[in-house]
């Protein structure tokens, strides 16, 4: 029995089975985690309030706050991960 397990083809097959099991468990773990994150109750009003606090602390100015609020208003009802209008998806800033 143990001599069969030493054959390279059998070892490769077992490795693929183990890898498949890890991917299967990981897929469902990530799916559940993303569902939890997406339904956390965060909405545009929460973000607007937090950005207003940043403005009061002096981290951003009034014009930046207006732009953020305008973008938040445009993104109401969009899917998470979508790039808001007025922002580029590339990181060439």
Image: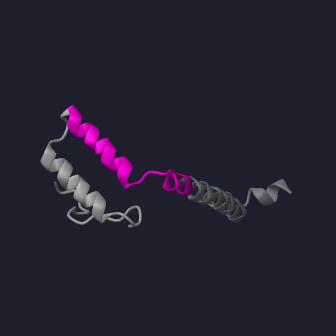
Front-lying residue, 18 or 76: 76
Dividing the picture into quadrants, the one containing residue 83 is bottom left
Query: Where is residue 42 shown, x and y percent of the image?
Result: 44, 51
Please give the count of numbered marks on the rendered protein.
0
Rendered view: 27 above or below 50: below
Name the residue located 32 percent from the left edge and 63 percent from the top edge.
75
Query: Where is residue 72 shown, x and y percent of the image?
Result: 29, 58
> Left of 46 or right of it: where is 10?
right
> Left of 1 or right of it: where is 9?
left
Name the residue located 23 percent from the left edge and 59 percent from the top edge.
70
Q: Which span is picked out in magenta?
A: 34-57
Quadrant of the frame with the N terminus? bottom right
Q: Residue furthest top?
A: 57
The secondary structure that most of the magenta stretch takes on is helix
Name the residue located 68 percent from the left edge and 61 percent from the top edge.
8
> Left of 19 or right of it: where is 38?
left
Front-lying residue, 51 or 84: 51
Query: Where is residue 17 shown, x and y percent of the image?
Result: 69, 62
Name the residue located 14 percent from the left edge and 42 percent from the top edge.
61
> Left of 41 or right of it: where is 49?
left
**Is 56 included in the stretch rendered in magenta?**
yes
**Is 22 included in the stretch rendered in magenta?**
no
Rendered view: 74 above or below 54: below
Quadrant of the frame with the C terminus? bottom left
The color scheme shown is: one colour
Dividing the picture into quadrants, the one containing residue 74 is bottom left
Dividing the picture into quadrants, the one containing residue 4 is bottom right
Query: Where is residue 51 shown, x and y percent of the image?
Result: 28, 44
């Amino acid at each position: 029995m143990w001599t069969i397990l030493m054959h390279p083809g059998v070892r490769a097959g077992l490795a693929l089975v183990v890898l498949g099991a890890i991917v299967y468990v990981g897929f469902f773990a990530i799916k559940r985690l993303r569902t939890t994150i997406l339904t956390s109750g965060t909405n545009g009003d929460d973000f607007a309030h937090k950005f207003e606090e940043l403005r009061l602390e002096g981290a951003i100015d009034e014009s930046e706050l207006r732009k953020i609020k305008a973008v938040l208003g445009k993104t109401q009802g969009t899917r998470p991960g979508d790039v808001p209008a007025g922002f580029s998806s590339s990181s060439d800033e």
